[in-house]
Image: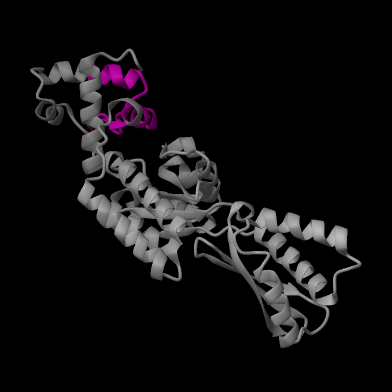
């Protein structure tokens, strides 16, 4: 595709940008007006035919115009797209709003996703990094009923994960207070992996010397953290913005979208890969496998906590996405979240 002539690139650029704006097949007459090139409709049709043969355009119906393939959109993103930075004033406003979210919100990931959805006009997705690599703030244990206790794992990025643990006997309030006091000097500022390693070493080296409260605290914490490794939270905000798009007027496509949003694992897997990417990444349509029937795109970027991976944030939508707007916006949101988390 690098061998496309300047004329072919110009026409392909016009097809992709017009399709992104309208969602409709683009015809030769429209292109003659958009390109500003001194070409007849017949000449443009010849170029379109060549782009068809190259696998960059398809014609849904014989009498219809063309729409770009995933391959064309990828070429557009990598080679033709004109990306502009988020304006300084808008960036400052975004930074301030995200900072306020992390200072005041009980659900910073959800509220950050909601903000990105509003700014992009699309659905936003946010996923924390695997729990093993995230920094902990505290762990609390709350009795619920006989034989059961609730472990509340609080991370320094403001997220909270709860899990129920089965226990053999009753733990008194006084014992819980002693356990919490002991854990306060162990958990805060360490990653889940670091806490687990510390617990294992102490249990192995000092089993005989530890009193009952310490052994109980270590055992409960180890169980809570093992459970945390199996947890994966993902936030999806603005789903209705997707469902209302003309692409999903078709029931089959709508069903595929709903399945992708409900099952979520496919989205989680993609975001996990982007956590260590270090930059904004775009996955177009079939590049995501069967997610949404191969008709969804994801633009995402990692956010960090003091330089360590904390998660990924992005925008999910049909392949007809305004990438030129979304790519810099996602990057700016990830940067704002990294700054806000690191200042907590």
- Residue 137 rendering spot, x and y as whole percentages: 58, 65
- Residue 62 rendering spot, x and y as whole percentages: 26, 29
* Residue 53 part of the magenta-drawn span: yes
User: In which quadrant will I find the N terminus?
Assistant: top left
- Name the image quarter holding residue 209: bottom right
Left or right of 104 in this view: 153:
right
- What residue lies at 49% left-to-right and 38% top-to-bottom? 277
Region in magenta: 47-76
- Name the image quarter holding residue 152: bottom right
Given residues 115 and 45, the one toward you in this image is 115
- Residue 168 rendering spot, x and y as whole percentages: 83, 78
Given residues 32 and 9, the one toward you in this image is 9
Check the image and report above or below for 23 versus 142: above
Question: Does the image show residue 100?
Answer: yes
- Residue 14 rendering spot, x and y as whole percentages: 20, 29
Left or right of 171 in this view: 206:
right
- What residue lies at 25% left-to-right and 20% top-to-bottom? 9
- What residue lies at 19% left-to-right and 20% top-to-bottom? 45
Left or right of 47 in this view: 116:
right
Numbered label tally: 0
Question: Does the image show residue 25?
Answer: no
Check the image and report above or below for 279 versus 51: below
Left or right of 273 in this view: 172:
right
Check the image and report above or below for 243 versus 17: below
* Residue 201 part of the magenta-drawn span: no
Looking at the picture, the colour scheme in use is: one colour
């Amino acid at each position: 595709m690098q061998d496309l002539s300047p004329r072919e690139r110009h026409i392909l650029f016009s097809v992709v940008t017009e399709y992104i704006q309208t969602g409709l097949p683009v015809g030769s007459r429209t292109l003659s007006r958009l390109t500003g090139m001194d070409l007849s409709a017949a000449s443009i049709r010849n170029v379109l035919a060549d782009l068809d043969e190259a696998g960059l355009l398809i014609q849904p119906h014989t009498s219809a115009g063309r729409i770009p393939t995933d391959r064309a959109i990828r070429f557009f993103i990598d080679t033709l797209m004109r990306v502009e930075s988020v304006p300084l004033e808008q960036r400052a406003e975004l930074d301030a709003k995200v900072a306020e979210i992390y200072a005041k919100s009980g659900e910073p990931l959800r509220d950050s996703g909601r903000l990105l959805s509003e700014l992009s006009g699309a659905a936003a997705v946010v996923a924390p990094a695997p729990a093993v690599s995230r920094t902990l703030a505290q762990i609390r244990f709350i009795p619920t009923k006989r034989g059961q206790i609730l472990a509340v794992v609080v991370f320094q990025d403001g997220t909270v994960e709860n899990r129920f643990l089965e226990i053999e006997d009753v733990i008194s309030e006084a014992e819980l207070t002693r356990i919490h006091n002991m854990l306060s000097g162990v958990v805060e500022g360490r990653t889940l992996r670091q806490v687990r390693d510390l617990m294992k070493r102490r249990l192995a080296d000092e089993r005989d010397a530890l009193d009952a409260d310490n052994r109980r605290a270590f055992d409960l914490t180890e169980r809570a953290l093992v459970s945390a490794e199996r947890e994966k939270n993902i936030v999806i905000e603005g789903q209705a913005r997707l469902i209302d798009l003309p692409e999903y007027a078709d029931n089959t496509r709508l069903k595929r979208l709903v399945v992708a949003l409900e099952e979520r694992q496919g989205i989680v897997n993609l975001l996990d890969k982007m956590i260590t990417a270090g930059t904004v990444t775009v996955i177009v349509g079939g590049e995501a496998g069967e997610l949404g029937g191969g008709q969804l795109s994801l633009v995402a970027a990692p956010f960090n906590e003091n330089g360590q991976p904390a998660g990924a944030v992005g925008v999910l939508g049909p392949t007809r996405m305004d990438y030129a707007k979304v790519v810099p916006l996602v990057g700016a949101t990830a940067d704002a979240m990294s700054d806000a988390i690191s200042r907590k």
